């Protein structure tokens, strides 16, 4: 009797899952049939695992390398449109001679604010220079800077190592640009 009392709730719970499978064929020449499975009821989003697409090696490479990213020698170059501001962009130095150049296209705002955040502990990194649309540079700066940007155009933010300080030369960091 006790076994029956335990089995009844289990059977009731297993019967609550409703699956409907439909198979359709386009025409007699069609080789493939479409299988469509739908599960009714609410799905807990924390119980959903990453999809096969997110775990695919190509997707992981894009997530690691980023979009609009180019590596030339020891320079990591990324391009962003100013219309996307504000944003945070992550990067990683893998060698001790690297520098990161973020090119912000078509910047029209009167100010630009850049801040290094989420840097790995002990990482030796700073904002080395900012290039203005007229090809002049300003810098070096520390871990954050706010500048007037009177000219419209492309601004470059150059991040690199502080040669006057100690610390790790490799690691991950993020830039907040506003």
Image (tube, rainbow, N blue to C red):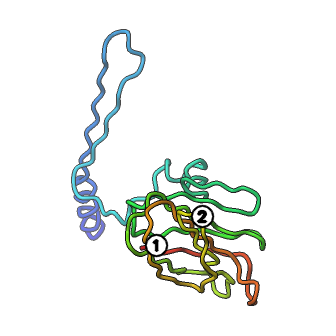
Q: Where is mark 2, residue-wise?
A: 135
The residue that appears at 73% across and 87% down in the rendered structure is: 167
Question: How packed is label 2: few (under 14 Cα within 10 Å), some, or many (20 or more)?
Answer: few
Looking at the rendered image, the quarter that the N terminus falls into is: bottom left
- Helix, strand or loop status at disc 2: loop
Answer with left or right where residue 164 lies relative to residue 40. right
The residue at the point 69 percent across, 56 percent down is 71
Element type where label 1 sits in the image: strand
Q: Residues within 10 Å of mark 1 (few under 14, many from 20)?
A: many
Instruction: Residue 135: name its quadrant.
Output: bottom right
Q: Tell me which residue sits at (63%, 73%) in the image.
A: 159
In the orientation shown, which residue stands out farthest toward the top?
29
Could you tell me which quadrant the C terminus lies in? bottom left
What is the x, y in percent for residue 116? 54, 80
Q: Residue at x 26, y 52 (%)?
A: 17
Q: Nearer the viewer, residue 162 or 92?
A: 162
- The residue that disc 1 covers is 177
Residue 92 in the image: above or below residue 140:
above
Taking 62 as reference, is 177 above or below it? Answer: below
Please tell me in which quadrant of the rendered image residue 78 appears.
bottom right
Q: Which marked residue is nearer to the observer: mark 1 or mark 2?
A: 2
């Amino acid at each position: 009797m006790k076994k029956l009392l335990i089995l009844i709730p289990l059977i009731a719970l297993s019967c609550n899952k409703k699956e409907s499978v439909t198979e359709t064929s386009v025409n007699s020449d069609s080789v493939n049939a479409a299988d469509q499975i739908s599960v009714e009821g609410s799905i807990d989003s924390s119980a959903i695992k990453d999809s096969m697409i997110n775990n695919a090696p190509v997707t992981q490479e894009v997530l690691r390398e980023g979009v609009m990213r180019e590596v030339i020698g020891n320079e990591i170059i990324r391009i962003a449109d100013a219309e996307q501001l504000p944003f945070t962009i992550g990067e990683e130095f893998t060698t001790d001679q690297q520098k990161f150049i973020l090119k912000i296209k078509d910047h029209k705002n009167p100010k630009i604010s850049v801040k290094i955040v989420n840097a790995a502990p002990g990482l030796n990194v700073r904002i080395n220079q900012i290039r203005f649309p007229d090809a002049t540079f300003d810098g070096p700066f520390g871990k954050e800077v706010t500048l007037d940007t009177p000219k419209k155009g492309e601004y470059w933010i150059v991040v690199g190592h502080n040669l006057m300080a100690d610390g790790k030369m490799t690691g991950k960091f993020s830039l907040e640009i506003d």
